[in-house]
Image: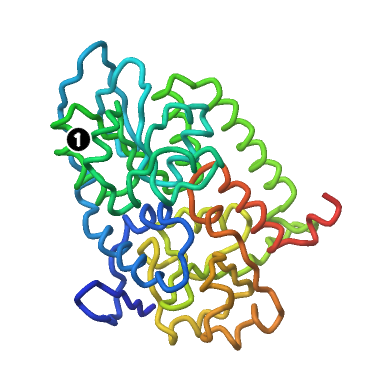
C-alpha cells in the first residue's frame, strides 16, 4: 500500500498508511497556475484545505432574483442555475475557466479575472478580482456580473450566499477527464450562446485525439499487446506532489498510451513519501515545469527514467489547466512516450 504524506495548515505533517481524500484537489491545482519558487508549500496547503470543502459542491443552486428574461441551465455539477436570457457580464475565478471562456468566443464578456489568469494575452488587461482561493468579494459585486464562474468546492461554499444576495448566479465548471473538458466547453457555448463556435472547436480537438490514437497503436504488428510505458508526473519536488486516480492527467496519460504509476492512488493530487516514490521505478518522469520543479525528486535517482535520461518537462500552465491546451499536453506526452511513432509525422 502507498504511504501518502499530507501537509495541513496548523496541523504539522501527518504520515499515515492510507490515502486522504482530495477530490477537490484537482480543481485547486488547475486554477493555481505555475507554482512560484518559495510558494509551493503555501499553494499546496491551500489545495488540501480546498479539498475539505468538497461536500459543498453537492448542494443545490441557490434561488436568486433576476430582473428581466431568464433561462435555466445545468452546470458541470448538475446544478440548475438561473441566468439572464443573454449573459453579457461574467467574472472568472480560475485561469482554466478564463481560457475556456475565450476559447468558446466569449472573452469580451469577461469583466473580471484572477491575478493568475495570463492566457490568452487579452486576459492580462481585464480587471483583477484577487487570486483564485482568496478573491475580493466586494470587487466582484461592484463589477455587477450576471454570472460568476467558479471551479472549486471551496469557492462555491464561500460565494453562493453573498452573490445570491446580490442577484448574481454562480456557475461551476468542473471537468475531471478530457471528455468532461469537451462537455464543459459545450456547456459554456450554451451559456454564452456561442454553441456553434464551441462545437467546431470540440470537433477539431476530438479529431486530434483520434489522430493520436491512430498514430500510437495499442497492438504490435503481429497482434501482441504493447507493454505500456510507466509514467510518473511530478507536480512539485518538495513536497513530492503527483497525480492520482481522480486527476484528469491520469486520463491524459492513458490516452497517450502510457500508464501512470500512481493511477491507483484514490485521490487527485497526493503527496508521496520518499520511501513510496523510490519503489515506483517509472520509465518516464514528466515534470510540471516551474521554477522550483526543474529536477526529479532525489527518490528517483536510481529509477529507470533517470538512468535512461527519460525525464521531460511540460509547461505547468498547459499541463495543469483543463481546457483546449490539454490536448497539446497529451500530444507532447505521446511524443515523449513513443518517439518512434512520430519520427515521420
Return the x and y of residue 94 as percentages of the image width and height: 39, 46
Residue nearest the viewer, comparing 210 with 188? 188
- In the image: residue 127, left or right of residue 306: left
Question: Among all residues in the image, which is located at the extreme right?
Answer: 344
Residue nearest the viewer, comparing 152 with 274? 152
Residue nearest the viewer, comparing 131 with 304? 131
- The residue pinned by badge 1 equals 163
Q: Residue at x 32, y 15 (%)?
A: 85
Is disc 1 placed on a helix, strand or loop?
helix
The N terminus: image quadrant? bottom left
Residue nearest the viewer, comparing 102 with 257? 102
Give the total of numbered labels.
1
Return the x and y of residue 144 as percentages of the image width and height: 27, 28
Q: Is residue 144 placed above or below 158 in the rendered structure? A: above
Q: Is residue 187 placed above or below 265 in the rendered structure? A: above
Q: Residue at x 26, y 15 (%)?
A: 70
Q: Is residue 201 placed above or below 49 in the rendered structure? A: above
Q: Residue at x 20, y 77 (%)?
A: 11
- In the image: residue 58, left or right of residue 28: left
Circle 1 packing at 10 Å, graded few (<14), some (14-19), many (20+), is many
- In the image: residue 125, left or right of residue 213: left
Q: Quadrant of residue 197?
A: top right
Question: Among all residues in the image, which is located at the extreme top?
Answer: 69
Q: Is residue 126 placed above or below 217 in the rendered structure? A: above
Return the x and y of residue 100 as percentages of the image width and height: 48, 37
Q: Residue at x 33, y 62 (%)?
A: 47
- In the image: residue 327, left or right of residue 274: right
Return the x and y of residue 229 as percentages of the image width and height: 64, 67
Please name the colour scheme applied to the rendered image. Answer: rainbow
Amino acid at each position: 500500500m502507498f504511504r501518502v504524506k499530507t501537509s495541513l495548515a496548523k496541523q504539522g505533517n501527518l504520515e499515515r498508511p492510507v490515502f486522504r481524500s482530495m477530490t477537490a484537489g484537482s480543481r485547486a491545482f488547475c486554477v493555481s497556475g505555475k507554482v512560484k519558487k518559495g510558494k509551493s508549500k503555501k499553494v499546496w496547503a491551500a489545495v488540501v484545505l480546498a479539498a475539505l470543502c468538497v461536500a459543498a459542491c453537492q448542494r443545490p443552486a441557490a434561488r436568486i432574483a433576476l430582473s428581466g428574461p431568464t433561462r435555466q441551465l445545468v452546470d458541470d455539477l448538475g446544478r440548475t442555475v438561473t441566468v439572464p436570457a443573454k449573459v453579457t457580464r461574467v467574472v472568472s475565478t480560475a485561469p482554466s475557466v478564463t481560457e475556456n471562456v475565450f476559447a468558446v468566443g466569449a472573452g469580451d464578456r469577461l469583466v473580471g479575472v484572477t491575478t493568475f489568469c495570463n492566457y490568452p494575452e487579452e486576459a492580462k488587461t481585464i480587471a483583477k478580482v484577487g487570486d483564485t482561493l482568496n478573491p475580493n468579494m466586494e470587487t466582484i459585486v461592484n463589477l455587477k456580473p450576471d454570472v460568476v464562474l467558479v471551479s472549486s468546492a471551496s469557492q462555491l461554499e464561500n460565494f453562493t450566499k453573498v452573490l445570491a444576495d446580490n442577484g448574481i448566479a454562480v456557475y461551476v465548471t468542473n471537468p475531471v477527464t478530457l471528455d468532461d473538458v469537451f462537455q464543459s466547453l459545450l456547456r459554456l457555448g450554451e451559456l454564452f450562446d456561442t454553441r456553434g463556435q464551441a462545437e467546431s472547436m470540440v470537433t477539431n480537438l476530438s479529431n486530434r485525439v483520434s489522430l493520436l490514437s491512430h498514430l500510437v497503436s495499442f497492438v504490435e504488428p503481429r497482434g501482441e499487446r504493447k507493454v505500456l510505458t510507466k509514467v510518473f508526473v511530478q507536480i512539485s519536488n518538495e513536497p513530492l506532489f503527483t497525480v492520482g486516480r481522480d486527476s484528469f492527467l491520469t486520463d491524459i496519460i492513458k490516452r497517450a498510451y502510457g500508464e501512470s504509476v500512481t493511477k491507483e492512488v484514490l485521490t487527485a493530487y497526493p503527496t508521496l513519501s520518499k520511501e513510496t516514490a523510490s519503489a515506483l521505478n517509472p520509465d518516464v518522469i514528466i515534470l510540471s515545469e516551474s521554477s522550483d520543479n526543474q529536477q526529479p525528486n532525489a527518490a528517483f535517482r536510481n529509477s529507470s527514467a533517470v538512468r535512461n535520461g527519460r525525464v521531460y518537462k511540460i509547461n505547468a500552465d498547459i499541463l495543469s489547466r483543463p481546457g483546449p491546451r490539454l490536448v497539446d499536453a497529451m500530444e507532447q506526452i505521446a511524443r515523449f512516450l513513443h518517439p518512434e511513432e512520430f519520427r515521420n509525422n
